[in-house]
Amino acid sequence: MVNSYSLFPIPYFPRTLFNYHNLCRITIYLASLFSLILIIFSILLSDCNSVQAATISENQNYLTIKILEERLDNLVKQEGVNTIDLSKYIIDFTPQANNFRNQFYQQIKTKISRTQEPIALDLSDTIIQGDFNFSQLGIATTLAEGALSSLITPTEQEQIKQYYPLSARVNQPIKTISVFRGILKLERTIFTATADFADSLFLQPVLATDTNFQQLAKFSNSIFGQTVDLSAANFNLDVNFDFSHFFQPTKFNLAQFQGVANFSNSNFEQSVEFKEAIFGQLTDFSRSVFWQPANFTKTIWRDRLLFSKSKFLDSVIFTNATFEKNIVLRDVYVGSTINFQDVNLLNRVDFSNAFFTNTANINVAGLAFDSAEAKIIGEIGTIGNLLVVDRYQGNETVLRNLVRNFRSLEQIADANQIEYQREKLILQQLSDRLIKLSWQRIFSITFISQVLNWLSLSLLLLLGNYGTNVNLVFNVGLVAIAFFSLLFWLIDRYRPGISQPIIPNRYETICMVGSYLTLTVLGIINIFITTDKPYLTLACLAIVLIPIPISLLLRLYWQGRYHKLLNLTYFVQDGSFRQFRLLLGRLPIMPLFPFCRDRYQPILWSKRWNWLNYYDFSLNNILKFGFNDIRLRDEHMPGIIATLVWYQWCLGVLYIILLLWTLSRTIPGLNLLIYF
């Protein structure tokens, strides 16, 4: 039997080495050795951290009185301006450093106020611990005529009067403000406590990019005479800019407002930018005035946004912005475009009682309703006219959502206006598509759908604003009725080329021509009032009314009339009833059945009110109702006259369809029956 140990030999260890006590000792020894290694590694790591901390403290020392005095005595040139360079320091304004705080304010204020030329203050990359009161660095002065501080130069006094007219404040309370005459640099500055810049007048630019306000930031009642740049600033808590005045371009791009942002009663004389800014809580711009464009592109609003009673004298841009809560724009004044292009809307936008000038509108191209609560609210019959989209392609869902939005609010007029705008965009798209085709291609597609769609849609838009304008439809009908009434009166009452000429008397001629001109002029005036394209509407109406009837009329008088019953009227009336009757189902010629024909008699030429019969007939033919049932006789009737009557009757069928369709879309009761 082979010894297994010989196959796999192992080193020889004394047996005493593997007893229980020795194993415990070995385990304890190894554990101690491992602990010692960990301790040494920790010490080395702490030394590295100490070196790094020493490096940081070397670059970020505490500002002392000695260093401050040295900096004040040795100003540096930055971009050609004498500057107090206090950058990259830690400034302690905590209660324990009360003596340092007082000397800091006093020495800087003395240095700035005693120098005639503006001195910049650079606090970039500085950490300010404790409350910071900026007003103690400026020159305190009373804003009243003749009461400005003597430390302010004449040039600065003129500048102050320009920013803050003193003569206009005769009957207003006297106000004290702190004037800071130099450039203020706060780039990457950190304020660990309250930063108070309220009641200050900045005569030079304020540069505060990447500034971090960890506590409350106060800028209330401040006046900024030059540019302000707070791009990428971080406001961890509330910030107050209420009653502030910005005279030059202002930037808050990429800023983060994590607390309440109060800009109420602010005044922006030049452009203001909040591009890609984030607003975490309530933002209040109530009663603010924007004189130049305000840019809120790609902003994110996580809470309510208030613009109540504000004034936008130029454009406001919210392109690609996201609104998670309500936007309140009640009682605002809008002088130009509000751009809501590609906005993500999750809640309501309220334009109640807003005033828009004639050139103002709201661009909603690409607007996305991203929740069931997303709605646009405004004055009934007005807000729909203000929402505009530049093209149909890519905005199909936007227009559909807007229609659904106003129908859910029972604002039928606004929903119809959106549909009218949608159809205009579709017509423009069809027109552009047809224009790009060659003439051969156009001729080959005459009988397919695009040309027919373009023609029918053009008629619906021009003659009734796609079923949204009852007044326009009525006035189109008024012009058509008056035209055909005059035409039929002329054919029936003026027959000069016969043996015994028939000519109307002067009274009847004056009444007929005068009434025609009156009705036509009234209709045309109302068309100009009720539609945005009156000339095209009148041109379309003229194409429908004039060519065929006038051609037939000229042919009738050119060839003359040679038939029996020339001395009788072409029109007959049913005299069995004299009342308004709905005549939708009847044709324009007298019935064939003998017993029915007995009821019809020729209209009376001898009566002074005879000219009204032609209006009655035209009403019957177009609107399908009238006082008497007047029709065309069928005995010895020239074909041209019959053709004219049938032509008007066909137009009347189309017109009554357009009228009923328009009424169903504009009367709430009928509309609800159709759409719900």
Image (cartoon, helix red, strand yellow):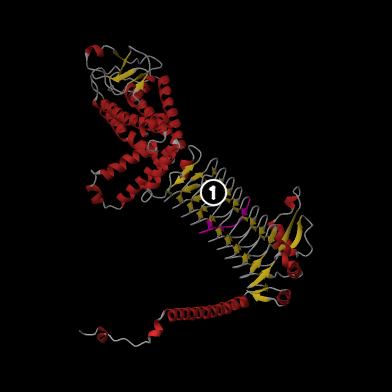
> Quarter of the image containing the C terminus?
top left
Residue 24's place in the image compared with 444, above or below, is: below
**391 sits left or right of 644 in the view:** right
Question: Residue at horizontal 43%, vertical 40%?
Answer: 417
Q: Main secondary structure of the magenta part?
A: loop
Residue type, numbered disc 1: Arg
On the image, the x and y values in percent for residue 236 come to 58, 59
Residue 271's place in the image compared with 575, above or below, is: below
| Towards the viewer: 423 or 22 | 22
State the residue lying farthest toward the left. 1
Question: Residue at horizontal 33%, vertical 87%?
Answer: 11
Please give the residue where the numbered disc 1 appears in the rendered image.
304
Q: Is residue 109 visible?
A: yes
Q: Quadrant of residue 109?
A: bottom right
Q: Which residues are magenta?
A: 265-278
Q: Quadrant of residue 64?
A: bottom right
Does 241 lie within the magenta span? no
> Quarter of the image containing the N terminus?
bottom left
Does 270 lie within the magenta span? yes
**536 sits left or right of 635 in the view:** right
On the image, the x and y values in percent for residue 476 come to 39, 32
- Secondary structure beneath dot 1 equals loop
Q: Is residue 87 visible?
A: no
On the image, the x and y values in percent for residue 75 come to 69, 76
On the image, the x and y values in percent for residue 496 come to 31, 23
| Towards the viewer: 610 or 55 | 55
For label 1, the crowd category at 10 Å Cα-Cα, with few meaning under 14, some 14 to 19 and many 20 or more, is some
Residue 142's place in the image compared with 561, above or below, is: below
Q: Quadrant of residue 133?
A: bottom right
| Towards the viewer: 565 or 292 | 292
